[in-house]
Amino acid sequence: MQTGLDVVTTKKYLILALVVCASINLISNFVGIDAAIFVGNMMYIPVAGAFLIVSVLMISRFGTSGNIGLAWISFGGYAISWFIAEMLWIVQELYLRIDPFPSSADIFYLVGYPFLLMFFIAYLQPMRLAITKKMFIAASSLTMGVLIPSVYLAIEPSKSSDLLQHMLSVIYPIFDALILIPALLGVALFFKGQVNFTWTLICLGTISVFVADTAFLFAQNEDSYYTGNPMEIMFYWNYVLLTFGVLGHMKLFQRSKQDSAQYR
């Protein structure tokens, strides 16, 4: 388990990273929309890149055997898919000067969801007995409470006549709902003392992307979205929370190996 010092240190740097991301976004918006769009795109290179690097390192250190190995391979698939999607988005918006939604980036965003869902299923498998029916019903009800209005908004007539955009606006909330349920269960298990703080960061990162996607859908419907606007902060926080969650797991894994070696 994590020591108190580990948690305090993690929280200190985590809060700093979250504040820095939010500050850069808000300052760029204060300068102007063009600055916000450029800075907003560039921000994804370090945050998504760091997430990808630590995910690959986690796989190399944890191995590929058992449910936990399968979980981290799936997690790595999610990190790779979304990193590619972010880079495609940047190229299309800043270099090709075309609207990146909908685009080829959406293929990789959508591919990432099954990987993340497999990660949650494999990782929660050993703790399935701790998940009560009441917890599952509560998580499902909360998710459906957000999903229904989001889908309704997506299927009603809007300013856009793009059929693909309408389809994606329905698909994304459904995929978000599928990963939100296990993420909420993970948070509930944390409060029951069943999982550690670093696991909770991964769940909070998933909840963050759910909130960001919902805000993105509403902004697209109102034709007010642009890359780098303040709601984008939640997307950055998704990567930051996931990165710190993986780093915490790496420290736990390294400590467990050291403890095992001492008893040999």
Image (cartoon, rainbow, N blue to C red):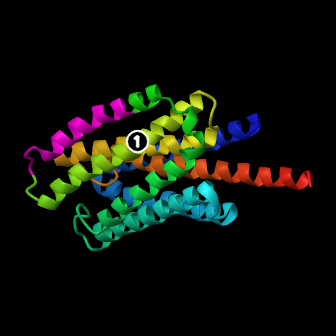
The C terminus lies in which quarter of the figure?
bottom right
Q: Is residue 15 visible?
A: no
Q: Main secondary structure of the magenta part?
A: helix
Question: How many labels, in total?
Answer: 1
* Residue 68: x %, y % from top left: 61, 54
Q: Residue at x 44, y 52 (%)?
A: 117
Residue count near mark 1 (Cα–Cα under 10 Å), binned few <14, some 14–19, many ≥20: many
144 left or right, relative to 223: right
The N terminus lies in which quarter of the figure?
top right
* Residue 249: x %, y % from top left: 66, 50
Q: In this orientation, which residue lies closer to the viewer: 104 or 138? A: 138
Image quadrant in which you'd find residue 257: bottom right
Q: Is residue 140 visible?
A: yes
Q: Residue at x 66, y 66 (%)?
A: 60
* Residue 156: x %, y % from top left: 10, 43
Look at the image and say whether residue 115 sits in the magenta stretch: no
Image quadrant in which you'd find residue 103: bottom left
Look at the image and say whether residue 145 sits in the magenta stretch: yes
* Residue 142: x %, y % from top left: 35, 30
In this picture, is 120 found above or below 77?
above
Magenta region: which residues?
140-159
Q: In this orientation, which residue lies closer to the viewer: 205 or 27? A: 205
Amino acid type indicated by mark 1: Leu
Residue that label 1 marks: 180
Image quadrant in which you'd find residue 126: top right
68 left or right, relative to 237: right
Q: Residue furthest bottom?
A: 96
